[in-house]
Image (cartoon, rainbow, N blue to C red):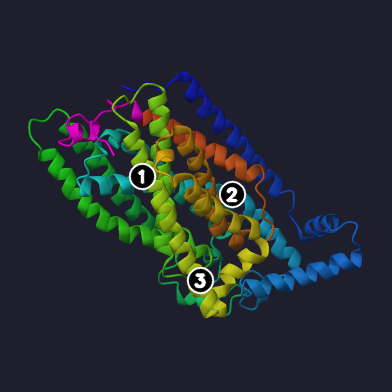
């Protein structure tokens, strides 16, 4: 049985406390600016030294450039055109909500990616991975609380994250009326959003509950009935998952840019969560093994996890390039605005995450021998996780805070908060049952696995 060390538990609680302080500071700091006059002073101080005329000209230029880049989405709502100062005020107030949402979704998607990987192992009747099942089950324990937190943030953030939740956005004649969003209101409405979210979470959590229940029951069973039950529900879950994951990605991520859509987006988000989940499985496995808890895990298991990290990083890059290249090549204004804003205002994180999610794993994990060296895999894993956090950051921030992005106290505080919560929940779950799924019919094959 695994024992959650006091040192690690204290570390997770410290992270949560520091995170709460950072998030609280972010909200306090954003509300120092309550009026357009406050924003004018801020903009003047930012352009100090360039002269008042230059600052005014720059503000006007930025206003029009932003409006063009966003297809007028940010500055114009129907007949209501916002001043540059009003627009910046909205962005400042959106930032702590967006930072919180990015971190909450990132840690939730790690757990959901691990759940998909777990389901695939069962459905494929994989012989190499049963020694890792308890680690996967511990990580997936975060799916339900993590998903509920994401929905709660979405509920309270409201139009700070989702412009289609603004008052009057679907009402003709209202100053916020948006014809394009109104045309999508059959899907993009608050009631439907949260009902769908609860259905998604309910389905994923039910599978997780019963798969773990049958897996534990199999440990003391005289036959393979529980194994067969898990096999059947895993196959059904994967069908449910591939549909609901796509819809979730449209609702929870893509709808922050309601004027834009991509038919590849569900797969793109899936690749990101899948590689992140596998990476965390590998890192927690190595941590537990370093504490002498997984003697039955050998370097061939580590090699296969690293192989998946490498392969899914390539798959993610294929989807990233396919989405980008097709939109760039067709050059349709409604589509290219998504990438124009990211190239204008997010060039460093946008191109940096491609290097972190593709070039780095490619160079580090290509060699088969390196996949067996724990510190090499940990180094690659840290870069991959940072890269996919920035990926989620790039998906959310341009639509919510525009060019006023920065990875500062609100963002770091949010990461610390959910990292602490993730560690606390996952490692508590690992203490519930023995770390070896001894009743699995493939367990001997898994224990003696050699690649």
Query: Is residue 142 covered in magenta?
Result: no
Label 1: few (<14), some (14–19) or many (≥20) C-alpha neighbours in 10 Å: many
SS for callout 2: helix
Q: Residue at x 34, y 54 (%)?
A: 200
The residue that label 1 is drawn on is 114
Give the Cα distance between marks 2 and 3: 28 Å
Query: Is residue 431 covered in magenta?
Result: yes
- Magenta segment range? 430-451
Q: Which mark identifies residue 99?
A: 2
SS for callout 1: helix
Q: State which tag comes first along the sequence, 3 or 1.
A: 1
Q: State which tag comes first along the sequence, 2 or 3.
A: 2
Position above or below: 136 against 263: above
Q: Is residue 1 left or right of residue 320?
A: left
Q: Residue at x 88, y 67 (%)?
A: 54
The residue that label 3 is drawn on is 325
Q: Quadrant of residue 298?
A: top left
């Amino acid at each position: 049985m695994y024992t959650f060390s006091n040192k690690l538990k204290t570390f997770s609680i410290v992270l949560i406390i520091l995170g709460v302080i950072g998030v609280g500071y972010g909200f306090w700091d954003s509300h120092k600016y309550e009026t357009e006059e406050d924003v004018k002073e801020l903009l003047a101080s930012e352009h100090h030294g360039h002269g008042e005329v230059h600052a005014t000209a720059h503000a006007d230029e930025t206003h029009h450039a932003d409006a063009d880049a966003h297809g007028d989405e940010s500055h114009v709502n129907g007949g209501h055109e916002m001043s540059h100062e009003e627009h910046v005020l909205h962005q400042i107030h959106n930032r702590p909500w967006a930072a919180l949402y990015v971190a909450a979704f990132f840690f939730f998607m790690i757990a959901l990616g691990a759940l998909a990987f777990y389901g695939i192992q069962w459905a494929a009747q994989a012989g190499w991975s049963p020694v890792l099942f308890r680690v996967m089950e511990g990580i997936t324990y975060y799916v339900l609380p993590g998903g509920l937190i994401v929905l709660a943030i979405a509920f309270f953030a409201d139009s700070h994250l989702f412009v289609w939740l603004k008052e009057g956005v679907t009402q003709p004649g209202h100053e916020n009326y948006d014809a394009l969003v109104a045309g999508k209101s059959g899907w993009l409405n608050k009631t439907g959003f949260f009902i769908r979210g609860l259905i998604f979470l309910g389905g994923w959590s039910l599978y997780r509950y019963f798969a773990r229940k049958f897996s534990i029951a199999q440990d003391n069973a005289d036959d393979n009935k529980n194994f067969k039950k898990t096999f059947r529900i895993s196959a059904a879950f994967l069908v449910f998952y591939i549909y609901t994951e796509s819809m979730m990605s449209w609702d929870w991520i893509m709808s922050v840019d309601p004027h834009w859509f991509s038919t590849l987006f569900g797969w793109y988000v899936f690749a990101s969560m899948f590689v992140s989940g596998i990476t965390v499985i590998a890192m927690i496995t190595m941590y537990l093994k370093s504490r002498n808890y997984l003697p039955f895990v050998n370097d061939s298991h580590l090699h296969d996890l690293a192989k998946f990290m490498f392969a899914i990083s390539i798959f993610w890059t294929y989807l990233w390039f396919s989405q980008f290249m097709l939109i760039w090549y067709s050059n349709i204004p409604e589509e290219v605005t998504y990438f124009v804003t990211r190239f204008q205002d997010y060039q460093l994180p946008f191109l940096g995450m491609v290097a972190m999610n593709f070039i780095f794993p490619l160079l580090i994990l290509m060699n088969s021998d390196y996949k067996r060296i724990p510190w090499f895999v940990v180094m690659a894993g840290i870069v991959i996780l940072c890269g996919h956090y920035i990926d989620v950051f790039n998906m959310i921030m341009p639509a919510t805070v525009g060019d006023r992005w920065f990875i500062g106290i609100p963002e770091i505080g949010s990461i610390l908060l959910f990292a602490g919560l993730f560690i606390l929940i996952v490692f508590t779950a690992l203490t519930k049952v023995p770390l070896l799924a001894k009743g699995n019919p493939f367990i001997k094959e898994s224990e003696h696995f050699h690649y």
